[in-house]
Amino acid sequence: MKDLNAMILEYPLLEGAIKSGVATVETLAGGPPSVDLSYVLPGAKSAVVFSVAMDQDSIPDYLGKKDRLSYEREYNMVNSISSGIAVKLAGTLFQRGFPAVPLAANDVYRDDTPRGRFDMAPPVSLRYLALASGVASFGWSGNVIGEKHGACIILGAVVTSAELTPTAPQNQEDNYCDGCRLCAAACASGLMDKKIMTEIHLGGNTFSYAARRDYTRCQYVCGGYTGLHRSGKWSTWSPGRFPVPEEDAPYLNLLIASSVSYGQRPEGPGGRYHSMMNFKLYTTCGNCQIVCVPDKEERKRRYKLLAKGGVVVQNEDGTLEAVSPEEAEKRLAAMEPERRALYAGDLKTSD
């Protein structure tokens, strides 16, 4: 078993991961339902967890709204690599006599929550596995962060019946997060509560992060349906200008209503298919994740690129273009009402 432990930890690293660890039923004890390994594999004992780093060269131009596609391709590729490593590792464990289930890096959700897949609850939380195993720690935002690459990592994992030796959580004194909250400043949806913290208890250890408001906020903005910051001075890569209310209650209906308009916008370059959408999903946000790096001056630079990058509008051929807030208003005003309604105005929602 000692040899199996060593091999299992090295396997993801040889396949392209930057860090690996092991969480067990014991080191996850006391956590929320999303750490129940038996949800995906009855009799599961352990989870092998790892992180894959994104190449960050495309991030400045993405945040500055000069080039969307390069970062989208990188993000999609690293998610695919992470999921692929999990599939290969699960196959290796299975063929050694240990039942194993790979966890996708993204885009797989539970159906048995109050709102089903709209809650976007994972079968098993990769974030919590990463905390318990020491693969990553929490930033104030609730995104997990690594010592070198910050939040610009994608997680993967395999749940298995093998009784592996757990690895220890990271020493919180080594966590670079200083509560700068640039992650919140970069979030046009207002997802993070600035006053309330959430505590997670895993195997006798306590981890905390900013409480999340209704997750539908993130689906609405990060999904690309809308994207204008409350200041009106910058946007995500979404050309949508639908309202972003302060209270949580309207968001599910806004999401449903805006999806109709979203589906009628012209197709642009890139995009991918998502299990919860009938149309292509374009990478338009993720800003809270990719502004967060260990170097605080770099964090500030990245946020400034975002805030000074202008407002995105969509041309009739589907391409996106960043312009000044004033120019964006002029272009919206010049549209025929039917076309303008795809991006801005009152949405017809049901109570």
Image (cartoon, grey):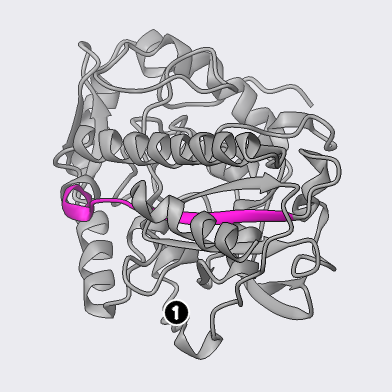
The residue lying at 38 percent from left, 43 percent from top is: 285
Q: In the rendered view of the protein, which quadrant contains the N terminus?
A: bottom right
In this orientation, which residue lies closer to the viewer: 23 or 6? 6
Q: Is residue 125 left or right of residue 44?
A: left
Identify the residue position indicated by label 1 in the image.
Answer: 177
Q: Is residue 14 left or right of residue 197?
A: left
Residue 52 inside the magenta-drawn segment = yes
In this orientation, which residue lies closer to the viewer: 164 or 85? 164
The residue lying at 36 percent from left, 60 percent from top is: 18
The image position of residue 309, as x and y in percent, is 19, 50
Compared with residue 349, is residue 188 higher up or lower down, i.e. above or below? Answer: below
Q: Which residues are magenta?
A: 46-59
The image position of residue 273, as x and y in percent, is 45, 19
The image position of residue 310, as x and y in percent, is 21, 46
Q: In the rendered view of the protein, which quadrant contains the C terminus?
A: top right
The residue lying at 31 percent from left, 37 percent from top is: 237
Mark 1: which amino acid?
Answer: Cys
Q: Is residue 326 left or right of residue 172?
A: left
Residue 187 inside the magenta-drawn segment = no
Label 1 residue SS = loop
